[in-house]
C-alpha cells in the first residue's frame, strides 16, 4: 500500500457505534499507515471520540449525517428512508470515487440493498453474495453466500460458484481452487432441488472450474474444498454455528485448565502455545465479510464486534481496494462469461 | 433397566458394517447388562464376528437377511426394493413388538421412509423429525430436524417445536424447556417465510410453550434455548458444521501442545484435564439421533462412527425404550392437541 487509500466508514452501524468504529479506525491506522478515512455519522457523538485519538483525527474527514439505519429495518424500507444516512453516504462515497471501499457494521440487509442499488452488480451476476474466510485444517477457505440471499435458485448458486472461484484465484492467488456445493450428503440424490440442479450445471459446464460436487457441514472446517457455495440462509447459520462451537471449545479448554492445580501449572507452561491457538481461531480475525458481485467494494463487519474486529474488517477492505481485486474479478468474470459457450446463467434455462 | 429389553440392530448399515455393529453391541452389553439383541444381516459375515464375542453371542438372536439398502439409494426406491433387507427387518421387529427399538447406521432417508411407513406417525404429526443432543455452555440442548425433511413449511416447524418441547419435558425432565427457531437474525423481519410464519403461530398459540423467538447459529453452542427447531437441511448442516469445528479446535489444541518443549511439559501436566475436555466434546458421545413423531422407537447412528459411537446410539435407544418415553410423548402430544383451541396444525390454515 504505497499510495494513500481512502476508506469510507459508516460510523453509526453496529451495536457499539460510533465508539468501536473510531477505535477500530485508530487500530487500522497503525497497521496501514497510508490509509485515510471518510467518517459518516453524528458529529456531536463522533467529535469527542476523535479528540482522544489525535493521530487518527489527522487522517479523518468527518461528514455529519443525521439519519441512522436501524438494525431491524427491512431492506426495502431502508432503501426508501435511508437516503442521507451514514450507511448510505459511505456507499455513495465509493460510487463517486471518493473512497476505494466502504465498511459498515450495520444492518446487513440494508447495506446489501443500498450497495446493490448504488454500485450496481457486475455483468452476469443476478445477485451479489457475501463471502468470508474460514480457518480450516488445511489453511483457509472461502464460503459464500453468508446471508445476502435467504432464498437461492440454482442459477444464483452457479453464479456464486463462479464468483468464489475467480475470487480464490485472483485474490487468494490459488492456482486451481476447488469448489464444493454445501449439501446434506455427498450422494447426487440428496438435498434440495436448487442444489441438485446447480450441481448438474457445474458438472456439465465447460468453464474451467474444478467442481468437486457436494460437500457437507464438516467439510467446512476440514478444508475439503477451497470455496464452499451455499445459499445465504444456510451459510449464515453455518458461519455462526462454527463461531459458537469455537467459543464453546475455547471455554472448555479454559475450564479444563482451571480444574486442578497441576492443570494450572500445565496451562502456565503451555500458555504461549495456547494463546497462539486462541489467536488462530479468534472470530475477530475473520471479521469482515466481502460483498462479491458488486461494481465497488463494500465490507460488512459483525454488528457485535469490538475495535480489534472492526479494524480487521477495515483491513479486508484495504486489501481488496489496494489490490484492485474487484476489477480483476470483474475482468475474469466477464472473460469467463464471454468465452464460454455455456454461460452459467443460460445453462439452467 | 431391570426387565430384559430387546433392541433390533441393522447389522449391515453404515460404513464399517457389520464389524462396528457387532463391536458396538458388545460394548453396549457391558454398559446395559439386561439388554438383548436381534441382529439382522448377512449370517456368513456376522457369525465370524460373533465368535470373537462369546458373551455377546449369548444374548444375540441372529436373523439372516440377504438384502442391504445401499447408502446412496433413494428413499422411494428403498421402500420398493428394500423389503426383506436388514434395515427393513429391524424396523419390522419394532412394529411386531419383538424389539423395543431399532438402531441403524445405514441410509438415513431410507430408514426414515421405512420407519414412517412401517411404524406410522403419531396423531397430529405430518412428518417425523430427527433429533439429537448438543453440548452447550449451559449443559445440553436438543435440536430438530437434523435431516429427515430437507424442505419444511411453517406447520412442520410448529409440529417440531411441540415435539421438541414435549421431548425435553418428558425425556430430559426439564420443567419448562425454552424453544427457539433457528434463523439468520433475531429480528422478526429476517429470514425465510416458513420460519417467520412458524414464529407467528408459536407466538400466538395458547399451547403452554415457552417460545423464545428466533435464535441464530451461535445460540446452539451457547445453549440460549433448550430446544432448537429448524428444517432438516439447515439442521443437518449446522450439526455437521459444529462437529467439524470441534474437530478443528481439538486439532489446534493438539498442535499448540506440540509446538515447543515447554508446551509439551505443560500438556503432560494438563493431560488428564484435557482428556476430560476431549471426552466432553467427543462427537461419538452424541451419536444416536432419535426419530421423533413415530409410533415406535428408531435411532440412527452416524454412518461413519466406530464401535464406541455405535454403542452410544444403542444406549440412546435403550434409554428411550426403557423409559417408555415415546408413549409419554404420544400422550402429551395428544393431550396438547386436544386441549388447545388453536391446534398447531390448524392455526396456520
Image (spheres, coloured by chain):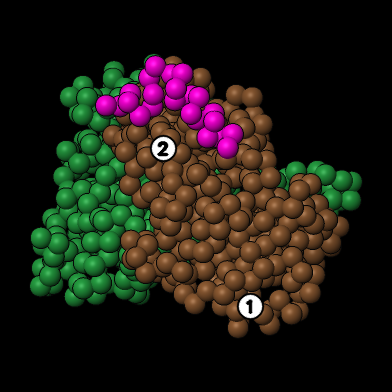
Chain colours: A brown, B green
Residue A328 sits inside the magenta stretch: yes
Nearest the camera: A115 or B83? A115
Taking depth in this image into account, of B268 and B30 the one nearest to the observer is B268
The quarter of the picture where residue B47 lies is top left
Which stretch appears magenta? Answer: A327-349
**In the picture shown, does residue B75 fall above or below B153?**
above
Q: In this view, does A60 lie to the left or right of A134?
A: right
Q: Which mark is residue A125?
A: 2
Instruction: Report which quarter residue B13 is drawn in.
Output: top left
Residue visible at 20% across and 72% down? B205
Q: Which of A80 and A74 is in front in this view?
A: A80
- As rendered, which of B226 and A47 lies closer to the eye? A47
Give the residue displayed 61% in from the left and 30% down from the top.
A169
- Residue A220 tag number: none
Residue placed under numbered mark 1 in the picture: A46
Sequence-earlier tag: 2 or 1: 1
* Horizontal side, residue B294 vs residue B19: left or right: left
Amino acid at each position: 500500500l504505497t499510495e494513500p487509500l481512502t476508506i469510507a466508514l459508516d460510523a453509526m452501524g453496529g451495536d457499539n457505534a460510533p465508539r468501536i468504529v473510531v477505535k477500530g479506525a485508530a487500530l487500522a491506522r497503525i497497521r496501514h499507515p497510508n490509509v485515510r478515512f471518510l467518517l459518516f455519522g453524528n458529529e456531536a457523538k463522533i467529535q469527542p471520540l476523535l479528540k482522544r485519538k489525535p493521530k487518527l483525527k489527522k487522517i479523518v474527514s468527518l461528514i455529519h449525517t443525521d439519519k441512522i439505519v436501524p438494525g431491524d429495518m427491512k431492506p426495502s424500507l431502508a432503501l426508501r428512508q435511508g437516503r442521507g444516512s451514514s450507511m448510505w453516504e459511505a456507499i455513495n462515497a465509493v460510487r463517486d470515487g471518493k473512497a476505494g471501499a466502504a465498511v459498515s457494521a450495520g444492518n446487513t440487509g440494508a447495506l446489501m440493498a443500498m450497495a446493490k442499488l448504488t454500485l450496481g452488480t457486475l455483468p452476469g451476476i443476478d445477485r451479489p453474495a457475501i463471502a468470508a474466510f474460514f480457518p480450516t485444517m488445511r489453511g483457509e477457505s472461502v464460503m459464500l453466500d453468508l446471508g445476502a440471499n435467504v432464498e437461492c435458485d440454482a442459477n444464483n448458486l452457479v453464479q456464486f460458484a463462479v464468483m468464489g472461484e475467480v475470487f480464490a484465484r485472483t485474490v487468494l492467488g490459488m492456482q486451481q481452487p476447488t469448489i464444493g456445493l454445501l449439501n446434506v450428503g455427498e450422494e447426487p440424490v440428496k438435498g434440495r432441488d436448487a442444489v441438485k440442479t446447480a450441481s448438474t450445471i457445474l458438472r456439465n459446464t465447460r468453464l474451467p472450474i474444478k467442481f468437486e460436487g457436494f460437500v457437507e457441514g464438516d467439510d467446512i472446517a476440514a478444508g475439503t474444498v477451497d470455496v464452499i457455495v451455499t445459499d445465504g440462509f444456510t451459510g449464515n447459520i453455518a458461519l455462526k454455528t462454527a463461531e459458537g462451537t469455537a467459543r464453546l471449545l475455547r471455554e472448555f479448554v479454559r475450564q479444563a485448565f482451571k480444574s486442578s492445580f497441576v492443570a494450572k501449572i500445565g496451562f502456565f507452561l503451555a500458555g504461549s502455545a495456547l494463546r497462539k491457538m486462541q489467536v488462530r481461531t479468534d472470530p475477530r480475525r475473520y471479521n469482515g465479510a466481502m460483498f462479491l458481485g458488486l461494481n465497488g467494494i463494500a465490507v460488512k463487519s459483525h454488528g457485535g464486534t469490538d475495535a480489534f474486529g472492526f479494524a480487521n474488517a477495515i483491513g479486508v477492505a484495504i486489501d481488496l481496494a489496494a489490490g484492485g481485486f474487484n476489477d480483476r474479478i470483474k475482468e475474469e468474470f466477464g472473460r469467463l462469461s464471454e468465452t464460454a459457450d455455456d454461460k452459467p446463467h443460460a445453462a439452467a434455462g
